[in-house]
Image (cartoon, rainbow, N blue to C red):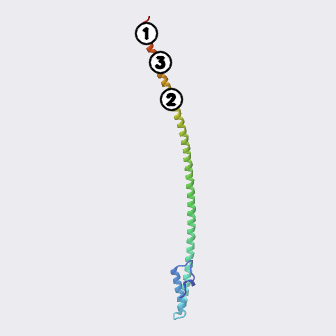
Amino acid sequence: MVTLNAYYKIGQGDAALGFFSELLVYLSATTAMGPLAGLQSQVVKLQKEIIAHMKTVELQLADIRKDISGFKAKLQKDLFGFKSKIKGELKGAQDKLNNVQGQLEGIQGKLKSAQAKLKDIWWDLHGVHNELEDGQSQITQIKLASQITQLSPKR
């Protein structure tokens, strides 16, 4: 039997079609020498039709591969665009977060400053309170002294 490599094959070839093609060549070769010599032209015709069909299938496969490559390229482009869009949106969100963080740090600084001022005011009020207590104590002492002098006998 003739080997499979001796015939026309499409691309890498299909094992079933290759086997069938090999069978046709074998039949073609054996029928030319035997009592079935009249079938040789039919076998050759059938073989040519199969080869033509195999060429058509190969062209269709090439078109399918081309469509798949185009679809793959479009998907990659769309994915790249989507990634770029997401990166841009994430960067924008990060910038906004950084801005808010800066504002919060500014507010925190103002709060610390206000807290320090409130502490100063508290100490001032505490001092005023102490002075008022001292003043009240002095007023009480003066009143007591005045009452004592009024109650003491005059000489």
Give how far apart the Cα atoms at labels 1 and 2 are.
40 Å
Look at label 3 and name its amino acid.
Answer: Gln
Asked which quadrant contains residue 141, the reply is top left
State the quadrant of the C terminus.
top left
- The mark that comes first in sequence, 3 or 1, is 3
Q: Is residue 106 left or right of residue 138?
A: right
Residue furthest bottom in the image: 35
Q: Is residue 146 left or right of residue 82?
A: left
Instruction: Kindly identify which numbered label has been placed on residue 91.
Output: none
Circle 2 is placed at which residue position?
A: 123
Give how far apart the Cα atoms at labels 3 and 1 are.
18 Å
Give how far apart the Cα atoms at labels 3 and 2 are.
22 Å
Q: Residues within 10 Å of mark 2 (few under 14, many from 20)?
A: few
Residue 23 drawn above or below residue 152: below
Residue 17 drawn above or below residue 79: below
Look at label 1 and name its amino acid.
Answer: Gln
- Assign a secondary structure to mark 1: helix
Q: Please give the name of the residue rendered at 56% of the width and 58% of the height, measured from the top-left corner.
A: 83
Circle 1 is placed at which residue position?
A: 150
Residue furthest front in the image: 155
Q: Position of residue 41 (x, y in %)?
A: 55, 89
Residue 63 drawn above or below residue 147: below
Q: Please give the name of the residue rendered at 55% of the width and 90% of the height, measured from the top-left corner.
A: 29
Q: Please give the name of the residue rendered at 56% of the width and 66% of the height, measured from the top-left corner.
A: 72
Front residue of 90 and 23: 90
Q: Position of residue 90 (x, y in %)?
A: 55, 52
Front residue of 104 and 29: 104
Verify CB contact (< 8 Å) between mark 1 and mark 2.
Answer: no
Circle 3 is placed at which residue position?
A: 138
- The mark that comes first in sequence, 3 or 2, is 2
Q: Residues within 10 Å of mark 1 (few under 14, many from 20)?
A: few
Q: Position of residue 11 (x, y in %)?
A: 57, 77
